Amino acid sequence: MRVTGAERPQGARVVPGGVEFRVWAPGHGRVDVVAYGEAGARDHPLAREGGGWWSGRVEGIGAGARYRYRLGGGGAYPDPASRSQPEGVHGPSEVVDPDTFRWTDGGWRGIPLEEMVLYEAHVGTATPEGTFDALAGRLDHLRDLGVTALELMPVAEFPGARNWGYDGVDIFAPESSYGGPEGLRRLVDAAHARGLAVVLDVVYNHFGPEGNYLPLFSGGRVFTERHHTPWGAAVNYDGEGSEAVRELVIGNAVHWVREYHLDGLRLDATHAILDDSPTHLLAELAERARAAAGPDRHFVLIAEDERNERRLVLPRREGGLGLDAVWADDLHHQLRACVAGDREGYFADYTGSAEDVAATLRKGWFYEGQRTRHRGDPRGTPAEGVPLPAFVHCIQNHDQVGNRAMGDRLCHGVSLPAYRAASALLLLSPGTPLLWMGQEWAASSPFLYFTDHPEELGRMVTAGRREEFRHFSGFADPERRARIPDPQDPDTFRRSKLAWEERERPPHAGVLALYRELLALRRDEPALRARGRDTAAAAAVGEKGVALRRTDGRGNALLLVAGLGPGRLRVDTASREETRPPEGARWDLVLATEEARFGGERVGELAAVSPGGVLELEGPGAVLLRAVPAG
């Protein structure tokens, strides 16, 4: 996967006898490479290429050399395309040679989207050590769980020692405190050895505020006032100088494919990537990233987008942008409203009724153009025709946990029977399930918002974080808001670390056993392996019950009935198509989420299916039924 010189990559590239440098710095009359060695710093002038690009070669240095760029004879700054920042975002950049790593994944071809079970993790809090290598030590757990793809929150070098990753500024440089470039390569190689894909969350909609030297290099061309986002002026993808900005991020995507063998990218907040060009940035990025992966590898591109916009995942030939999947949060919101009763903020747009949960399962997302209560305007586009695996569903993720004031997980606010029932709906649905780290054992640790900014910026972040919640009834009182954990406090970060040892204790061990069994069924059952729209049907059964029927068109059928609230649920399975067994078959119990082995406390018969096909279930809880020959 060596990059050829003809591609003219930006940054530092090791060549025989030295290092080639290339940087975009329009508007400057001179650009030098400052190389740091035992004899001190030495400036090496670069030659002007045109279009604002500068390049040159420095002899006698190689991998490990430290350097900066001096602009116009003035200050010297880190490389915007640095592959490594061992001293942080303000320190010198380090030359990296990706070809020295000895990969062992020569036969690896990736995982198709239809087989993906994503596991989202934050490297710094997923293990006590908070490193790539420590996370590699947990990969056997993910494989045995039934996960097929590890999704990493952003790992680009960020300011300070702790951060979610969305404040990254050196987008080519894996975070030094996590283990830097070599640590990430070891993690990916180890994942591939276990049959696990690795997807990386990347941020192309904004850049962090601390250590962002791009404006100094670009002469202000990296942002544009033509578009605006929640972070201010948008990244310039369609105005003057946008060719180089586009190359920065597209080159970054290609870099993750080539230099780190990644299997996919999750693109943060694509609704804030604004581009009026004839070819949208995302379409060009998708084309070039897939070309870098090659025709024999599965490579997935997943958007995070709040618009329910089908254009994202439609093929280019149909007027789409050609991505593979999109985070579809409507199912999370409906289920949370249903089992936890959330109604404030954007949850005001969701009833949480069994009818609406079932509709979201059937369609992939709920809003297809209806007017919303919270926003007050129409939202969404029709889901029809979009393959169900293109919808990434969850019952929690880093946003939906970490953006709560106290970082509380779903299992902290609802009963475990309700949690197990919601988990069964997620894991047996035809969409692509995403798990949030620790979800599989109902982890006790919160996931809080944490930063490590300089003092002045840190005070602003703390105040802003608490101000976000002033409109919520639980935090209308200033004294209550003052108790929201301080993002700058190191203890906020420490509290967010997973406690892996609790997996072996009840009730966590039972939840983990349920997740393992459900994911094994998802992998092995023919009716669950089918992903077409004609293989899944969902319907409300009672006020708090949802039935999900899965078939494969060859007589194999499963029926999941989930009671999401208290009380007895009675379902006449023969009364409607969504719950009826195939002709000549009857329903037979496979499992119930409230069995003792899963941590349930039910005694006696867990669920009863009468000879006439009437199911009775005491909720909350869920049962899975399999079609077997009648008689």
Image (cartoon, rainbow, N blue to C red):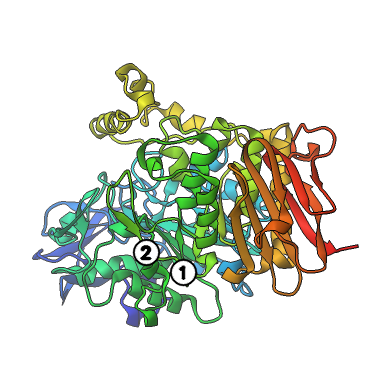
- Secondary structure under tag 1 reads loop
Q: Nearer the viewer, residue 127 or 409?
A: 409
Q: Position of residue 165 (x, y in %)?
A: 39, 47
Q: Position of residue 152 (x, y in %)?
A: 49, 53
Task: List the single residue furthest toward the top.
Answer: 479
Q: Quadrant of residue 150?
A: bottom right
Label pair 2/1, CB-CB below 8 angstroms: no
Where's the C terminus, which quadrant?
bottom right
Question: Residue visible at 59% across and 42% down?
Answer: 544
The CA span between labels 2 and 1 is: 9 Å
Asked if one can make out residue 611 in the rendered structure from this viewpoint, the answer is yes
| Above or below: residue 423 compared with residue 620 | below
Q: Quadrant of residue 296?
A: bottom right
Task: List the single residue furthest toward the right.
Answer: 631
Residue under pointer 1: 384
Q: Nearer the viewer, residue 112 or 357?
A: 357
Asked if one can make out residue 103 in the rendered structure from this viewpoint, the answer is no
Badge 1 amino acid: Glu
Badge 2 amino acid: Thr
Residue under pointer 2: 381
